[in-house]
Structures are given as C-alpha cells and as structure tokens.
Amino acid sequence: MISIGRIMRLCLLGGNILVSLGFLCCSYSPYISPVEHSIWACSGLLFPFFFLLNLAFLLLWLIARRWFAMLPLLTLFVCWNATWTYCPINKPMESQKRTLKLLTYNVFNFSEGKDSILAYLNKSEADVICLQECTLDKQVKKALSSYPYYKHLALAGENGIACFSRFPILSAERISYESLNNGSMLYRLKVEDDTLLVVNNHLESNKLNSEDKEIYNHLLKSPNQKNVEKGGKLLLHKLADAVKIRAVQADSIAAFISRNSSPFMLVCGDFNDSPISYAHRVIGQGLQDAYAEGGSGLGISYNRDHFYFRIDHIFAGSAFRVLQCKVDRSIIASDHYPVWCILEY
C-alpha cells in the first residue's frame, strides 16, 4: 500500500518537473520567434516567478530529499545565463585608462519634472546622453549647453529621441522600420582619433491604457480564477501584439548594426522589453550587455503601475570594458529611471 507521504512526494516531484519545464521555457523564450509564436515569446515575463518557484523546490528537497534537489539544481545550471542576465552580481571596477560615460533615459516628455531632469543630466558627468520621449525647446538647449553637440529626431505625439554629446557628432542616420511613435538613430561621434558609433532606440510600447493597467493591478490584488481567465487573456494578447511589432523592429536594428559593425559601438535606449526577450537578444548579438557585465541586482528601470522590469538597456562593442553599470533610482521625474555605464576604452 502506497503511503500518504510517498504520494505527497510524487505530487511535489511532478510539480517540480512542471516548474522546471516552465523555467526552461522562460529562459529560452528569446529564441522563440514572436512573429510566429507571439504568446510563447511573452513567457520571458514570467521568468522571476519560475525562478523563485525553482529556488523554493531546491530548498524543499535539500531539507526533505537531497537527491531530488538535483532536478532544480540541474535546471538552474541550464538556465544560468538567463539568470545572470536578469539579475547579475558585479562589483564596480576602477581604471587608470581612458573612460567614457554613457547615459540613457526615457524622460517621459519632461512632463513630471523638467527642471529636475535637466539638473540631473547636467550633474551626471556623462559624456554622451541618449534620451527617449524627448521634446526639444530653448529651455532644454540652454540647460544642456555644456553639451555643445546634439541631434534630435521628432516623432509623432512629441515622442522624439535625442543625443547630447561632449564629442562632435559627425553624422546622424535614422534606422528604417515601420513605426509612427517610435524610432532609432545611429550617431557617428568623433572621439579623439576614433569614430564612436552610438545607436539610440525607442522600441514599440506595450500600449496598455489606464483600463488595462487597472485590470493588471486588480489581478495582483485578487488573482482568482475568474480574474485570471478574463483579465489575464486580455493583457496577454495585448502584450503578444506588441512583442510581435518589436520583433520586426529588432530585426531591422540588428541587421543595421551588423552592416555597420564596429568594436567601437554603443547601443542603448528604451526597448520596452525585459532582459529575457527576443528584442534584447537579437539587438545585443555580438555585443556586451553592460548591465550583465557591470551591474548588480534586478535593475528595475520602469517605475510605474507595478510593472517591475528592466526595459532600458545598454550594449557595448568589444573595444570597451564595462567598469560599472547602474539603474539610477536617485531621481523620480519620469516613468523610467535613467541607466548609465562607465566604460574603459
């Protein structure tokens, strides 16, 4: 006769197997084409939940049945790259060589604290600043006069992107892809005897309106079956539609980067996608993820409506060594936090 204890262990083991499969699916979702399988491509958003569940099973088996702990340990090993990308642990490094500081910031059209943002940017000591959702007027130009070189691309809905630089901007070229409110630009900067390529991106948003965000918050407060089935499906389909659009944009950006490949290249901006996503993987191919190399912790860069994700990213070419990368939570004057990194070159 099978004991109750053995039945419970078998049920827990079955649950662990399902969690391991879910964790694997989340970790490798960046390799799923959002155009062909948009729903599955969104599974990376569930990465932290499956990571915590896998960790819980690991602790459970270490206490109850140590041999069973091999399953969550093996799963964690197979998913280690994704885990480190999502939540790295690095210490800042120092350098006696030449360094460059890049800052990227979605300023939300300066609508929640223009003076605060401009003061922060002036004190940032960044050499190159890339902004998204940025309008450009006399006040902005005057406040950032310490950056004598700048380029601004106006998009629909006051949704422009801009680059402010201490180095001369030799040229600016828009990366072609279909979008009304979003865009990407390549800037060529003269840095001593080198030409630095900087790509500034603002990819398609998830287009969740206030009603959608209310549904999401209600799901967090009351995650019962009815709410999940009704509200969850609605949100999932909206996210799937957006991730499909971003995939096409990401492919265009990646192809452009490949054609203009250079070890002296920096790619940054608001990707509107997490570190475990198709857009992050494709755009970052052949480049270093600055946060994974020099950041520490979750690095949540979006600060509204309980959406706890890092959706602003920086990538660096092989000519750079990432010394430090940080999501700066010292200023709350936008729905994003600024992200900056210090690079040795």
Image (cartoon, grey):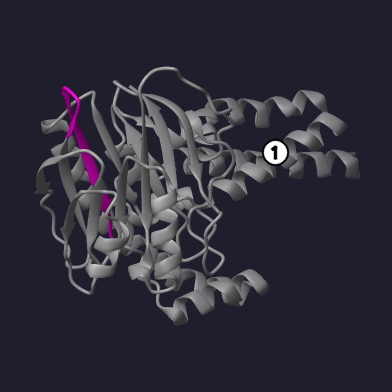
Q: Position of residue 316 (x, y in %)?
A: 32, 31
Q: Position of residue 95 (x, y in %)?
A: 46, 20
Identified by mark 1, the residue type is Leu
Decide if residue 32 is in sight here.
no
Label 1: element kind: helix
Q: Is residue 124 above or below residue 88?
A: below
To which residue does mark 1 refer? 55
Q: Position of residue 78 (x, y in %)?
A: 53, 27
Q: Split into 4 quadrants, where in the image is the C terminus?
A: top left
Q: Is residue 166 above or below residue 330?
A: above
Q: Along the line of sight, which residue is nearer the eye, 128 or 122?
A: 122
Q: Along the line of sight, which residue is nearer the eye, 65 or 77?
A: 77
Crowd class of label 1 (few under 14; some 14 to 19; many from 20; radius 10 Å): some
In magenta stretch: residue 192: yes
In magenta stretch: residue 199: yes
User: Which range is magenta?
Assistant: 190-204
Q: Is residue 303 left or right of residue 98?
A: right
For the stretch drawn in magenta, the main secondary structure is strand
Rendered residue at 62%/42% (across/down): 51
Rendered residue at 52%/24% (across/down): 93
